[in-house]
Image: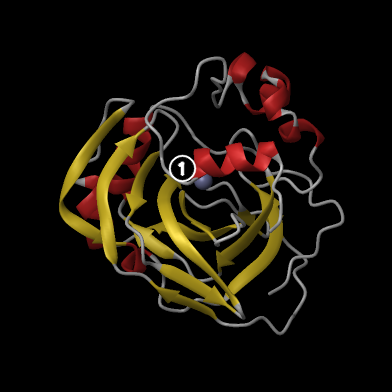
Amino acid sequence: MIKKSAKLTTAIAIVLSVQGCARLGESWSYSGKSGPDYWGELTPSFSTCKTGSNQSPIDITRAIEGNLPALKIAYKVGGEKVINNGHTIGVNYEKGSTITVGDRTFELKQFHFHAPSENTIEGKPFPMEAHFVHADKRGNLAVVAVMYNEGMFNAELEKVWAQMPEQANTKVTLKQPVNADKLIPANHDYYRFNGSLTTPPCSEGVNWFVVKAYDTASKEQIAKFSRAIGHDNNRPVQPVNGRVIVK
Ligand SMILES: [Zn+2]
């Protein structure tokens, strides 16, 4: 049995469901004195945002060729509630949907969105990025990230978007449960690197899988998300430092 640090345990509790509201004394934002430049100073439990050396997001560049195992996605139809927590719009997922990479399996807990994208590819940001957050039985985290370009209307996304709560701290039950699998491009080739949560407490040790192929959403769909959140919700890219990005 591996004993996890208290910090990681807290981080896991926070990210494993899209929660309705921040805990007292831990409020943060995307601008001003509670914005990304200050996260590490807001409370001691957020210090990794400032002191960490494997922070996310990053600009994905100079990736090296590796013999990466296939990213196998086995999701069920499982999203039932859409939540606006003021920082993002997300969907908590029922048990039983997994990804397998090599000999490691992680269960899907929730997915949520950022606009514009957090990670960039060769310096290029995308209009929107989805994060599918997973955990294994020991609490190790894995995020599958998917970039969205402006283009074709996205019908699966619309199952969530049609009922997107425009008020912060609101939860709505979906009329039609969403299939997260349909929000990920069929070609699962990916960039692999180590990183962190992109929101406080910025905990490290997160396995990132950024899918190379991108999906699309219409201009109106992307605008609707930005309107509901009311501001950009992307943390700026962080130094790569000694990390290796494998493709
Ligand atoms: Zn995210």
From the viewer's side, name the closer residue of 145 and 121.
145
Q: Is residue 157 above or below residue 181?
A: above
Q: Quadrant of the C terminus?
A: bottom right
Q: Quadrant of the N terminus?
A: bottom right
Kind of residue indicated by mark 1: Ala
Q: Is residue 155 above or below residue 71?
A: above
Query: Can residue 153 be seen?
Result: no
Q: Quadrant of residue 124?
A: bottom right
Residue sticking out furthest to the front: 1
Q: Is residue 146 left or right of residue 1?
A: left
Residue sticking out furthest to the left: 175
Crowdedness of circle 1 by 10 Å Cα count: few (<14), some, many (20+)? many
Q: Is residue 89 left or right of residue 14?
A: left
Q: Position of residue 175 (x, y in %)?
A: 12, 50
Q: Position of residue 121 (x, y in %)?
A: 63, 59
Q: Secondary structure at mark 1?
A: loop
Distance from mark 1 CB to nearest ligand 1 atom below 8 Å: no
Q: Residue at x 47, y 46 (%)?
A: 16
Residue sticking out furthest to the right: 242
Task: Report which residue position mark 1 lands on.
Answer: 115
Q: Residue at x 74, y 35 (%)?
A: 48
Q: Quadrant of residue 50?
A: top right
Q: Is residue 120 above or below residue 170?
A: below
Q: Position of residue 44 (x, y in %)?
A: 72, 22
From the viewer's side, name the closer residue of 25 and 147.
25
- How many numbered badges does the structure rendering display? 1
Q: Is residue 153 left or right of residue 68?
A: left
